[in-house]
Image (cartoon, grey):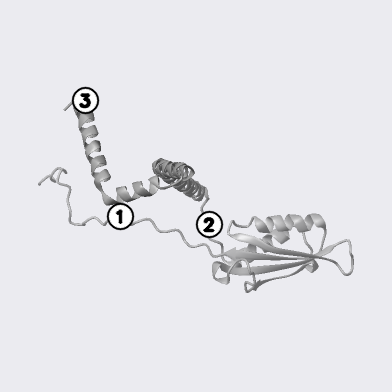
Amino acid sequence: MNLDDLKDRFISDARQTWERVQDSAAYNQLRDRYENMTPVTQKLTVVGVVALIAFMILSIPYGAFNQSQTYVEEFESKRMTIRELLKVSRESADVPQIPQAPSMDMIRNNIQNQLTAANLLPEQMKGTEVLTNDSKIVPQNLTEGMLQVSLTKLNIRQALDLGHQFQSINASVKLKDMAMTANAEDPRYFDVTYKLIALAVPAPPEPPAEAPTRSGSRNRNAPPADEE
């Protein structure tokens, strides 16, 4: 069947459909009402019908366009989400492994050695004590403990240098607080209190153990032992 045959068949089917419509009672009623209208009303009716048909025809591509816009927006949103997830994944992979914090005794000994190396006088060292964690930022179950170092009659340089040294003890030991007040005897110096928190870093997972070899197993490719 060629194109001309399809065209003739379509015209024939359309003519038969139109004839059936003309024979219907509803069409005849609408036709009678239309003929009884005034010329102005007839023009308005024709314009309204044409507008309705045009709206129905145009609504199909418009609806498809809106649906495609929705799909594009959803695709863009998911693509941005995937990009953010990949970025977070790369950043998390680049974070260095934090070592476990040393014990509180080791931290105290380290601080004592630093104070001795700083050539502080015995009367400047008021004491070092272990306290319970009172931080509202770091929960207590995520810390190994808190250490308070109290010093007196320090100048600005000594206070800053010692704070930097305490912060550098270990990557899991953080300087939580540093309180400075003017010394009562000599306002040129300061009484300084340092508070250090040791983070409770979980131990890294142990590598999987190798499967034990059988003690009685023997390499089949090994040469046999010499017999005497």
Please name the amino acid that badge 2 sits on.
Answer: Pro
Marks 3 and 1, Cα distance to the nearest angstrom? 80 Å
Picture coordinates of residue 84 (x, y %)? 50, 48
Q: Amino acid at mark 3?
A: Asp
Q: CA distance from mark 1 to mark 2?
A: 25 Å
Picture disc at residue 4 = 3
Decide which of 26, 38 is in the foreground and name it. Answer: 38
Q: Position of residue 40 (x, y in %)?
A: 49, 43
Mark 1 or 2: the one toward you: 2
Residue type at mark 1: give it.
Glu
Q: Quadrant of the N terminus?
A: top left
Label pair 3/1, CB-CB below 8 angstroms: no
Which residue is identified by label 1?
210
Q: Mark 3 falls on what kind of element? A: helix
Q: Residue at x 78, y 57 (%)?
A: 158
Label number found at residue 99: 2
